[in-house]
Image (cartoon, grey):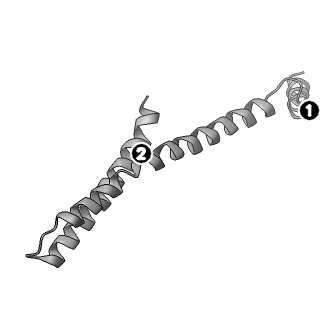
Amino acid sequence: MLELLRPMSRFHCFTTCVASTSYLLYGRMLQDEPCYPIFEETIAFVQLQGIFLPVLFMIMERKARYNRFAQLNSNNASSTDFVARYNVEIMRGW
């Protein structure tokens, strides 16, 4: 469960920090003028999280699945590499 929450919290903190920082910087530049349109634009950036976060999860899941597949494929009992390693260990033990 924590494996799923860690990237989500990182991405959420990153988008929120970027939006908050840009709002504060633009607000200081305007000083006395109204900041509401800029506030809307910076908060709209945070909603991109709904687009990029599932893509990030798909990429991470594909990478993990490929790693599991490669590991199972190389450790298969019918693999020539596995048979060669097995024969070396058996001969060493005799």
Measuring from the top left, give residue 25's x and y in whole percent: 22, 72
Tell me the element at label 1.
helix
Q: Is residue 81 left or right of residue 28?
A: right
Q: How many marks?
A: 2
Q: Is residue 21 left or right of residue 64?
A: left
Crowding near the residue tagged with mark 1, few <14, some 14–19, many ≥20 C-alpha atoms within 10 Å: few
Q: Amino acid at mark 1?
A: Thr
The structure residue drawn at horizontal position 33% and vertical position 53%, both measured from the top left corner, is 46
CA–CA distance in space, label 2 to label 1 = 45 Å
Q: Which one is nearer the viewer's eye here, 43 or 82? A: 43
Measuring from the top left, give residue 17's x and y in whole percent: 29, 58
| Residue at the spot of label 1 | 80
The structure residue drawn at horizontal position 90% and vertical position 21%, both measured from the top left corner, is 94
Q: Amino acid at mark 2?
A: Gly
- Point out the tag, 2 or 1, that comes first from the N-terminus: 2
Q: Which one is nearer the viewer's eye here, 19 or 71? A: 19
Q: Disc 2 vs disc 1: Cβ atoms closer than 8 Å?
A: no
Tell me the element at label 2.
helix
Q: Which one is nearer the viewer's eye here, 55 or 87? A: 55
Of the numbered discs in the image, which one, if any, rests on residue 50? 2
Q: Quadrant of residue 77?
A: top right
The structure residue drawn at horizontal position 45% and vertical position 35%, both measured from the top left corner, is 4
Task: Give the vertical position of 43 relative to 57 (above or below).
Answer: below
The structure residue drawn at horizontal position 23% and vertical position 66%, both measured from the top left corner, is 38
Task: Give the vertical position of 34 relative to 49 (above or below).
Answer: below
- Tell me the quarter of the image containing the N terminus: top left
Measuring from the top left, give residue 85's x and y in whole percent: 86, 32
Q: Which one is closest to the eye, mark 2 or mark 1? A: 2
